Amino acid sequence: MTTTATARTRDELTDQAATASIDAACRLLRLPVMRDRLEDAVATALHHQAGYKTFLADLLAAECDERETRRKIRAVKAAAFPRIKRVEEFDFTANPNITPAVVHTLAGGTWIREGRPLCLIGDSGTGKSHLLIALGIAAAEAGHRVRYTTAAALANELAEAADDKQLTRTIARYTRLDLLCLDELGYLRLDRRGAELLFQVITAREEKSSIAIASNSTFTEWSATFTDPRLCAAIVDRVTFNATIIETGTDSYRLKTTQANRARTKETGR
């Protein structure tokens, strides 16, 4: 065997050993993206004549990007949103009552860091739940601890926790959240016990952590949900103090879309 061939064989063996060592290290350090993309990254670096630091920086960036993506997915899943909605998907032209600048500012999350409330008030189909979920997802992806629930579901959960002597622990879990997204307040009447338990969660979070509420009823109509006038007044006082209030109006986007689709169908059928 010639000296050149021997050197080539030695280089190949050294390269194989290095690849195996890198693979083992990536597995040990739990760096799956770096392990999977190693060969492609090496080829790209050789093609562009990239230096060692650039090559390593690109691999590390790929690993960090993938981890961030997985973190966001976990955070959104943990928040228990019923569906995925995003701010950029919201059709502001369909509802002129909603100011885009206000929503995009809310998506930045300053109000959450300051522990301020958000109230979305309007009829069904006007975009309340879309915005509630979209802003909640933006907050979760930004690193905030978020949970979505409906008013009725939370009241039932608290009642069950009280029956199981787990109420203190359950309230503490909701208190630790950075943002509680409370949907469908006003759709169902709560009994006195449910209303009082819900009030405990709201009070525990007051001026410390944010709550975002979507309701199809105006504040003066909340007495239909919270039948005790004093309790109702106390809840309204707490969720509106220093709050951002967005009134989404009465014109249903879903209804308008259905009517428009029917009109187009009739035109097409002629």
Image (cartoon, grey):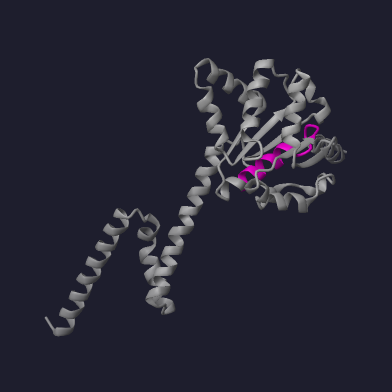
Q: Main secondary structure of the magenta part?
A: helix
For the point 76% across and 37% down, which residue is it? 240
Can you give x and y, in whole percent of width and height, for residue 221 in the image? 82, 25
Q: Farthest residue in the left direction?
A: 1
For the point 57% across and 34% down, which residue is it? 175
Rendering quarter of residue 134: top right
**Looking at the rendering, in which quadrant would you find the C terminus?**
top right
Is residue 223 depicted above or below 47 in this figure? above
Rendering quarter of residue 146: top right
For the point 40% across and 68% down, which residue is it? 41
Can you give x and y, in whole percent of width and height, for residue 185 in the image? 72, 28
Does residue 5 appear left or right of residue 210 in this picture? left
**Looking at the rendering, in which quadrant would you find the N terminus?**
bottom left
Query: In this view of the protein, can residue 68 be seen by the observer?
Result: yes
For the point 69% across and 51% down, which residue is it? 88
Tell me the magenta residue range: 122-138
Residue 205 on the magenta span: no
Does residue 31 appear left or right of residue 74 in this picture? left
Can you give x and y, in whole percent of width and height, for residue 73 in the image? 52, 45
Rendering quarter of residue 156: top right
Is residue 243 depicted above or below 16 in this figure? above
Residue 124 on the magenta span: yes
Does residue 32 appear left or right of residue 182 in this picture? left
Query: In this view of the protein, can residue 85 be seen by the observer?
Result: no
Which of the two residues, 6 or 221, is positioned nearer the viewer here? 221
Which of the two residues, 102 or 21, is positioned nearer the viewer here? 102
